[in-house]
Amino acid sequence: MTQSTTSQILDGKQVSQQVVEGLSQELQAIHASGAVIPKLVVVLVGDDPASQVYVGKKAKMAQKIGMLSELLTFPADLSQGELLAVIHRLNTDASVHGILVQLPLPKHLDTLAVITAVDPKKDVDGLHPLNLGLLLTGDPLACKPCTPAGVITLLKAYDVPLAGKHAVVLGRSNIVGKPMGLLLLQENATVSYCHSKTPDLAAFTRQADILVAAVGVPKLVTAEFVKPGATVVDVGINRLDGKLVGDVDFESVVEQAGYITPVPGGVGPMTIATLMANTLALYKRSLRA
Ligand code: NAD
């Protein structure tokens, strides 16, 4: 028989607001000092509707907190050479402190080559191989990928114990799954990765004290996947019957988990807040260089 518990919601909306308020105050001080204002440039290629929503939210938040932001949009048939030229121009523009290339890129573009072309010192998404290498070695100079770093901030805001706990990460993408596991490892969790080739997922996930789902499969994680009292973090953003749903079947898991993130209002706002924090951190670093 499964034990029923009352979940506490990990409220990403609320925690992200706290993060953003802190950043906003720092930006007010920067404005008052007459210093150069931090600037984030987001590059969007093509017309993927979800990407358009995400970049819009990012630009809006940057403006809200007093950061300069620019959205560069290009048609889906932009060539690799043209995109690399844009990135080169942004790399050499001293007024730009953060560059984010919105993923996924259209299929004909070489994503790794594009990410690698971004100056690691302006790589706000922490996806450049140099930043991922710094993350792997535990170097504090690593700019950490926004979504997994935001998850850690959220877990810490609720004092969710991580050290010595078993964290199971579903998904192994470079942008979420892999860095998520590395950041949990840095917090001294014991980390397991599961992915599309893992047989009997639930046998692994039921062992998790902390379960992070980042697979892009709507409602994959049901109550049978979850140990009673576990912390469940839902990174997934999927459209199902016109509604936004996560990778976790919230209604089924909420009875079982100790803590759970909602979708929307969980990891999404933390990603955007972390993007702002990363931009400000890179800006400050550029002043010291
Ligand atoms: P991805 O497609 O690059 O990677 C998905 C991963 O899940 C792969 O490693 C794959 O092995 C694994 N996987 C796929 N199907 C599986 C299955 N049935 N069982 C087990 N593992 C499976 O996706 P991604 O970029 O890592 O994003 C994952 C999800 O998170 C998506 O829904 C995406 O929209 C969402 N996302 C949300 C945010 C946010 O801010 N909340 C940010 C980035 C991505």
Image (tube, rainbow, N blue to C red):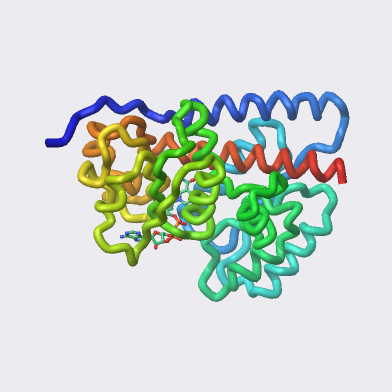
Instruction: Tell which residue pokes out farthest to the front in this image.
Output: 164
Name the residue at 63% across, 57% down: 132
Quadrant where the N terminus sits is: top left
x then y, percent, for residue 53: 50, 48
x then y, percent, for residue 40: 70, 46
- Snapshot quadrant of residue 103: bottom right
x then y, percent, for residue 14: 49, 26
Name the residue at 63% across, 25% down: 21
170 or 280, which lies in front?
170
Q: How many marks?
A: 0
Name the residue at 19% across, 29% down: 4
Instruction: Tell which residue pokes out farthest to the left in this image.
Output: 1
Is residue 115 positioned above or below 54 on the image?
Answer: below
Residue 71 lies left or right of residue 214; in this view the side is right
x then y, percent, for residue 161: 45, 31
Is residue 262 positioned above or below 282 on the image?
Answer: above
Name the residue at 57% across, 46% down: 146
Residue 83 lies left or right of residue 211; in this view the side is right
Quarter holding ligand 1? bottom left
Residue 264 lies left or right of residue 51; in this view the side is left
164 or 228, which lies in front?
164
Residue 288 lies left or right of residue 161; in this view the side is right
- Snapshot quadrant of residue 72: bottom right
Taking the image as drawn, is residue 177 in sight?
yes
Is residue 24 positioned above or below 215 on the image?
Answer: above
Taking the image as drawn, is residue 71 in sight?
no
Is residue 233 positioned above or below 217 on the image?
Answer: above
